[in-house]
Amino acid sequence: MTSNTSPDQLVFYDIASGPPVRPFAPNPWKVRYALNFKRTNYVTEWVDVSEVTETRIRLGVPPVRFFPNGEPFHTLPVVKDTATGDLVGDSFDIAVHLEKKYPSNPSLFKHSIGLYAAFNAHIDSIFPKGGILFAEGFPFNPETAEKVKTEFCKRAGVSSWDALNVQGEARREVVKDYEVALGEIVKYFKFSDGPFIGGAEPDYADFIIGGWLMMLSVTVKEWSEIRTWHGGFLGRLHDALEPYRGTW
């Protein structure tokens, strides 16, 4: 929590799971990896899923994502820089901010930042293809679960949560298609000795993928199977990122 922040501290607004509270959402995980990799001084302000929209509006951070109908999608992460008062509300923009603020710490970007921006967009277009697999294991807070489920159903255009909780043969078909989809990501490891895309040391490209892998590890019951797909590249990356997860 953030009751006592020092003048040079960062406040990281992250989406909380149900108890015991832990991080699980992909974009906040990208930021958490980056914060730990850059060895920053930060504290986590946990926000229940039901309070994300209210929190972002209260902070005065404009939306960076929108629903198909044009309505704003208020989400997290947000990072507040207590030294400058800056509020940054997009995971990629936060990584750029950290790189500028801490230039002498390990670099998040070994190549053009524009390349990472394109890579981020590409990866973010692939992982949600299996999004319906996330529903069953979503770590709701029991006190707000029904409210959040109602909102998620409204966004998805379905009448009940059961419509998002695919099972049986239909689920196996989704899993099979997801294996094919994630094969597109594994291509980036083709010319690397691993465990990271660039070899022995990680950079922000690994954190982009790693954020999504954390989401899968928490919510998808087939995670133990997924981590072995395509020669186990994704499982090895997930394991190699463990030192950058920190504590919460």
Image (cartoon, rainbow, N blue to C red):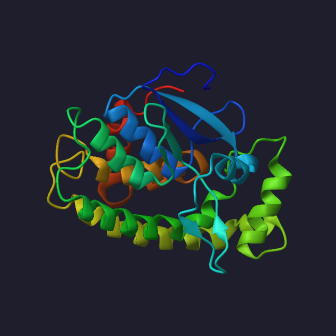
Residue 239 higher or lower than 25, as above or below: above
Picture quarter with the N terminus: top right
Q: Is residue 182 left or right of residue 101?
A: right
Looking at the image, residue 47 lies above or below residue 192: above
Task: Name the spot of residue 73 as percent of width and height, x first.
Answer: 63, 64
Residue found at x 68% / y 53%:
57
Q: Is residue 102 above or below residue 207?
A: above
Residue nearest the viewer, comparing 211 with 54: 54
> On the rendered structure, is 201 left or right of 208?
left
Q: Position of residue 3 (x, y in %)?
A: 63, 21
* Count of numbered labels shown in the rendering: 0
Name the residue at the bottom extreme: 69
Q: Is residue 227 in sight in this rendering?
A: no
Can residue 239 be seen here?
Answer: yes
Quarter of image, res 72: bottom right
Q: Quadrant of residue 180?
A: bottom left
Find residue 204 and report its horizontal and vertical position in percent: 30, 49
Q: Is residue 54 left or right of residue 240?
A: right
x then y, percent, for residue 118: 31, 68
Q: Residue at x 58, y 62 (%)?
A: 63
Please give the name of the residue rendered at 48% of the width and 69% of the height, measured from the top-left corner: 178
Q: Foreground residue, 10 or 38?
A: 10
